[in-house]
Amino acid sequence: MEDRAISHQPSPRLETLALVHNGKCDSLEKRLRANLKISLPFFRRRHQRRTITQRVASGRRNISQGTFALDTGVTDIDAESSLLGLIELTCVHVHQMVAAKKHVPIVKKHKKRFNRHQSDTYMRVDPSWRKPKGIDNRVRRRFSGQAAMPKIGYGSNKKTRHMIPSGHKVFLVQNPKDVELLLMHNRTYAAEIGHAVSSAKRVDIIAKAKALGVKVTNAKGRLTTES
């Protein structure tokens, strides 16, 4: 795709350069500097494919579908000035959700619950695990044929611990601003909306997550109705 020339006529919003580059980010930064005449020190990231998303007076439109997008907001500019104004550059993902990082297979070494001693005998004893402390307790003393106690050997792989089946780890969010924390970590963490968040705010959170390419585990909560 050919680079579009920038008009230096004063306007409240300037339609910025649109280009799709499949090379490294460093060469894309040089092309942006040459066309936008602005320093982009924080734009250096080692991603292979990027897309610039324009935000113009008529609204927001995607130039091309890619793995990553650059969301560009342009303020008023002066025709006589060599600087094109303040350009806010934020690396965000396109509307397509980004897959999780590659990881070893998720294996749960021990799925069976550890029940509290004598919880199967007495109704008053809850099955949630409590370590027995009695000086003569046969479970604590690990007699043959007794219930097993939790120990470190039952733990799963540390690399996949707390992972959900999609390969993400859950991050609780309460408002759209919390989703921005996952901007650079959307391949590691997935957002989960808090249970007390209203349906109106859930719409804003999901829209923000969609723009940043963040996975939402409970996106349908309070937003779907049964027929």
Image (tube, rainbow, N blue to C red):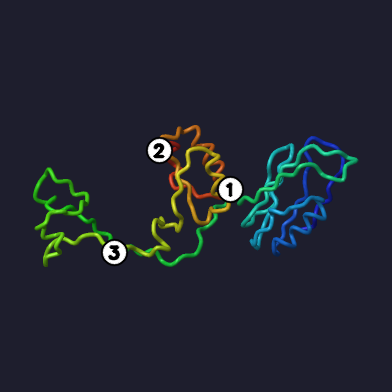
When the figure is inspected, residue 26 is found, relative to residue 12, above or below; the finding is: below
Q: Earlier in the sequence, mark 2 or mark 1?
A: 2
How far apart marks 2 and 1 lie (CA) works out to 22 Å
Where disc 2 sits, the SS reads: loop
- Indicate left or right for 88 with 143 as reference: right
Question: Looking at the picture, which amino acid does disc 1 mark?
Answer: Leu
Mark linked to residue 195: 2
When the figure is inspected, residue 178 is found, relative to residue 161, above or below; the finding is: above
- Indicate left or right for 128 with 197 as reference: left
Q: Nearer the viewer, residue 69 or 117?
A: 117
Question: Looking at the picture, which amino acid does disc 3 mark?
Answer: Tyr
How far apart marks 3 and 1 lie (CA) works out to 37 Å
Nearer the observer, disc 2 or disc 3?
3
Which residue is denoted by mark 1 in the rendering? 212
Question: Looking at the picture, which amino acid does disc 2 mark?
Answer: His
Q: Earlier in the sequence, mark 3 or mark 1?
A: 3
How far apart marks 2 and 3 lie (CA) works out to 31 Å
- Assess whether mark 1 and mark 2 are in contact (beta carbons under 8 angstroms): no
